[in-house]
Amino acid sequence: MFYRFLKWIAKIALKVFFKKIHFTSLSEIPKNSPLIVVSNHPNTFMDAILVASLINREFYFLTNASVFTNSFIKWFLKKLHMIPIYRNQDVKEGNPDNTDAFKECILHLKNQGALMIFPEGVSESKRQLKKFKTGTARIALLAEESSNFSLELIILPIGINYSEPENFRSNALIITGNPIYVKDFKEVYLSNPQDAVNRLTDSIYYSVQQLVIDTQSDYEDELIKNIQTLFVNQYGLSHNSVYGIFTIEKKIQSAIQYFSVQKPFDWHELTTELKAYFYTLGKYEFDDYTISNANSLKKLYRISLVEFILLLILLPLFVLGWFTNWVPYTLPKLVATKMTPYKEYHAGIKLITGLIVFPVWYFLSYLWLGFLFHNEIQTLWIFILFPILGFFSLNFSFKWQEVQKKLKLVYEFKRNKRKIAELKIQRKNLISKLLKLQMEYQNYQSEMISN
């Protein structure tokens, strides 16, 4: 009951925290059979909250044992269905003993339950998958062995992708992949259990890898983002199209791997030009959106001016919304930055802090309004306006930043006409080369399919 109540609360909180959550399932998610969900782990406990809220199953979670620090926390985490798992760094001497945890997991699976495991064992926001631990495969194979491989246990790979992992009102993309049937590894397991564990772990890793952007280095990650930025701005694609952006980046990554091997000199020349272009943008505090829209400045100026005047008219409402909601919107961010410097924890801390701060703040506001007006109906109507004004102010601030960006574009164009003209030419050449490579890569893919 406690778990279900928190799951209901989490669903509401996630809709507030994220601007958009895009959930894509490539296969049917099992509703009753034993299930292990495995995923990448870029955003600590936010990952678990997101997946558990989107999938209609009651999950048990394998959790770092180091957080089970005292009896109260142990009781509370148990209520949240968390099972402590020990890592090498969690024990002072010898190897970690997870026998009891494995037994609990196996029993839960035999009762048609669902587990959620993050096989990387650590959480980092970098888009680089870590080597998967073998614990997931060992639990799965032991569970099937205990049922003579008749359990019908399924491992469901999931990819979690964030536009800005630690930021409020960012976007999230969750993709579920094709299921892995553990019984398919029966013959290998009976002849060589360790080989079966390794093969299943590799299969899990490969399946998750297809559902995320897994770069080889920070340089490759930056290169993918830069090329994606050029295409998105060139074709006017919305940055809110989360799955569309992911698909573009997947194709770019695949093309990078092809051209870096097949045409290393041409590819090196292109990447050098890309680096120079984006370096110049940073130097002059421009962005690619500025350059891509430089041809429609008059229209952009008129639209921006109208939006600016409208925002000025609505400014009093923004001030009122900011004043009445400043504490609940600001405090979670402050708590997150004070608690830890690791940004992988920030989103989760903000969400949990918000679950406490928002209800308390609005309750105190209701009491304060009741004290001021001594009229229940009037107090209630004004109180209802508080969260509405808060959302209005939040969207107002985003729109204000967007209008500022557009007006700055007009100003910078007049101040740096020559430099922007040079960057426009540079950008045009880059787009031309990228489109040529895109055509070549598409032809290569077509030949591969036909063969």
Image: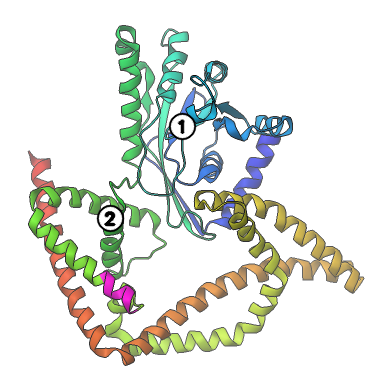
Tell me if 18 is positioned left or right of 159 in this view. right
Residue for point 21% across, 48% down: 254
Camera sees residue 30: no
Amino acid type of disc 2? Tyr
Q: Who is closer to the viewer here, 24 or 335? A: 335
The residue most toward the right is 374
Residue 434 horizontal/vertical position (percent) = 16, 63
Dot 1 and dot 2 residues touching (CB under 8 Å): no
Give the SS element for disc 2: helix
**Tag of residue 219:** 2
In the rendered structure, does residue 279 fall within the stretch colored magenta? yes
> In this picture, which residue range is highlighted in magenta?
278-284
Q: Is the magenta stretch mostly helix, strand or loop?
A: helix
Q: Who is closer to the viewer here, 130 or 322? A: 130
Tell me if 416 is positioned left or right of 325 in this view. left
Residue under pointer 1: 37
The residue most toward the front is 93
Count residues near mark 2 (Cα–Cα under 10 Å), then give few for <14, some for 14-19, many for 20+.
Answer: few
- Looking at the image, is 252 positioned above or below residue 62? below
